[in-house]
Amino acid sequence: MSAEKDRVAEFSAFRQRMNERILAEDNQVVRRFFALDTQTYKAGALEVKTKEMLGLVASMVLRCDDCISYHIAQCKEVGVTRDEFFEVFSVGLVVGGSIVIPHLRRAVDFLDRLEGGAASEQAEGCGKHA
Amino acid sequence: MSAEKDRVAEFSAFRQRMNERILAEDNQVVRRFFALDTQTYKAGALEVKTKEMLGLVASMVLRCDDCISYHIAQCKEVGVTRDEFFEVFSVGLVVGGSIVIPHLRRAVDFLDRLEGGAASEQAEGCGKHA
Amino acid sequence: MSAEKDRVAEFSAFRQRMNERILAEDNQVVRRFFALDTQTYKAGALEVKTKEMLGLVASMVLRCDDCISYHIAQCKEVGVTRDEFFEVFSVGLVVGGSIVIPHLRRAVDFLDRLEGGAASEQAEGCGKHA
Amino acid sequence: MSAEKDRVAEFSAFRQRMNERILAEDNQVVRRFFALDTQTYKAGALEVKTKEMLGLVASMVLRCDDCISYHIAQCKEVGVTRDEFFEVFSVGLVVGGSIVIPHLRRAVDFLDRLEGGAASEQAEGCGKHA
Amino acid sequence: MSAEKDRVAEFSAFRQRMNERILAEDNQVVRRFFALDTQTYKAGALEVKTKEMLGLVASMVLRCDDCISYHIAQCKEVGVTRDEFFEVFSVGLVVGGSIVIPHLRRAVDFLDRLEGGAASEQAEGCGKHA
Amino acid sequence: MSAEKDRVAEFSAFRQRMNERILAEDNQVVRRFFALDTQTYKAGALEVKTKEMLGLVASMVLRCDDCISYHIAQCKEVGVTRDEFFEVFSVGLVVGGSIVIPHLRRAVDFLDRLEGGAASEQAEGCGKHA
């Protein structure tokens, strides 16, 4: 568990550090893309909760563990319940097919840890979700 | 416009006829998949409107015109507004990138026609969305 | 129906003409790739029938109508039965998800026409499968 | 040929009209994305020609006919030669695999027409490239 | 080697535990999808061996290491030979392109270990295949 | 840092060993594909530098960390500058969307290490880029 926590902290630090390096570059297209990405999930005609669920299902069918974890964390913060999460997962699974299953397992594991239940004992190799 | 309408009707008939042929086959996996697909979008912890928007954004990032049109029609029926549609589109566009743009153009054209505004005068080749 | 047949013939001619143009170019990588593609489906440890079914399912999950039609025609020639086709389709559908369904409809329509049953009356826009 | 030209003109008009409709919407994320997309291909550390070839190969491996045609036209304008085009195609083909071949055929057909050589006689269904 | 074995065992335990957690959720769509996934590979008009090879090539072109390893293990159990494996791989490689190569390397490494030959000495980060 | 270096060396050795095993197999299609892959990036109408940037952007939009790292290393060797790298990245990001961001972070981290600047302190799980 503590090796796991170190890994999560390590990845968060990596993410933070790399974002800073990327935004420090003198490339306006990249910087604007990052700003636009943030703007996309702000409340508008749709509330933040809906938009984050949209981001989550899009990440599932495109099968990106990092993105899935990020949107799960955001969804959790704005009150998505476990039953709601599983309905988002069910859409992702049916649209995207069984190829989504390995990502679903890692998504549920990440959600479990966020909820403080059934803490994962797997060291989780990629450090992708945290 | 009337050539366009014929094409839409033609495609709807094609879709209906092929679904019937597929479901008439003695293949239980395929039939169960179709049943599951229908079940996925029923109201549950999330309402139908949210689930259809999830189906729509998933279809956009996976770039399937038929699926996009189908979910736009379903969304329209359960009251998704034009502003809400564009916010779903914005998530699909930012997550999926500029490669989504041609599908966005066809999606907006389809939505326009559903709304009876700015009727498309393009014959639309693929007959995919209708 | 005769408009349909013209379209099929038109597409076959297009395919043939473009392949010839591509192979006439002085680009060795492209020409070798085409040769390698042909070699891939020759009998070896696996028979042609199995290899063509592998090509078909790969085309389904990658959602390319042209490739699906091509491999359906090849499979048909080496004796894949309708029940076997639907089992290949079922693997493609479950692995690839509901996003595969529009391609499945066009695949079954193409197979129907090959088998001379339930001839499609749809004009089929893309001319992709034939 | 004249049916073909009408179709090309029709599609160009469609593209133009839909872009205008999309940009007229009150959705800042979508509008900014379109602006960013334009900015991406401006000369910088890399010249326009190189950037357009990058856009072309990315479109090929993601298999979007509209995007491929668009970048072929842009590349042609900034002087990409036929041999250079085929080398870009060869990278797209080898990285993306045989699933790219149907798009390659349409790409070469589009390039042929741009170059005024071997004009296509195919009606081209999708109206995607032009 | 023993660190490797621990990692494989760890991943198998993770997979088993997460599947159980997922199936214990009160989400019928997800549970039915898992049941359907199992049913897909049962003997029918095609034998299990053929279906597992179909699952394998589909996983390769969609580039999912977990799924590739799973189907390699299933194929091995029903008697797919090394030469047959490489012919499945060759279809996946040619259809999917060079982007499949990193997955092919991990697939061959996994197969080597299953066959007890040339045991991998790489720690294998992701714990995905085992 | 030394754990990091060991991991990089470990992965390079893995890559080298697996390539040798694959090429030692009696499968001509696979061996020819590897040869063709090498041939693709040789100087021709386009110089090596351009071709490697094409390979890099194609790998980014298809989201393969191994391939991205490989082409970054090749690009670096033939003189691609940091500003040029970021322009290639910007094309990949805009075409492929925000789903590319996690790969961009790992790409920049890899580039940083190649350039000897801002050495990564992350253990990097997958061992994919190095």
Image: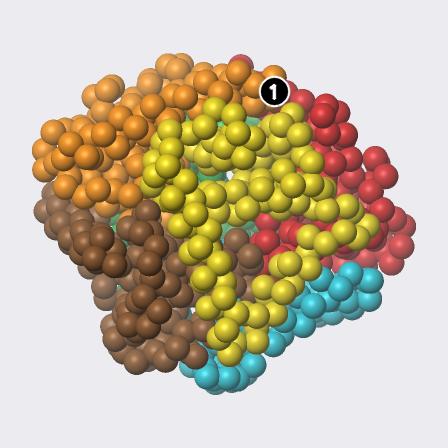
Chain colours: A brown, B cyan, C red, D green, E yellow, F orange
Residue in view at x 37 percent, y 37 percent:
E2
Viewer can see residue E46: yes
In the rendered image of this protein, does residue B21 appear above or below residue C57?
below
Query: Residue E11 in the image: x percent, y percent?
Result: 42, 50
User: Can you give x and y, in whole percent of width and height, for residue E20 in the image?
Assistant: 50, 66
Q: Is residue E109 above or below residue F99?
A: above
Between D52 and F13, which is closer to the camera in this rendering?
Answer: F13
Look at the image and tell me whether residue D16 can be seen: no
Task: Say what amino acid the circle numbered 1 marks.
Answer: Asn
Res C97 quadrant in image: bottom right
Q: Secondary structure at mark 1?
A: loop
Q: Position of residue A79 (x, y in %)?
A: 30, 80
- Outermost residue, front side: E2
User: Label 1: which residue?
Assistant: F27
Q: Nearer the viewer, residue F43 or E127?
A: E127
From the viewer's perspective, is E117 left or right of C35? left
What chain does mark 1 sit on?
A: F
- Residue that appears at 31% across and 52% down: A123
The x and y percentages for residue A109 are 37, 63
Q: Circle 1: is it few (<14), some (14-19), or many (20+) Cα within 10 Å?
A: some
Is D69 or E123 nearer to us in this picture? Answer: E123
Q: Nearer the viewer, residue B66 or E89?
A: E89
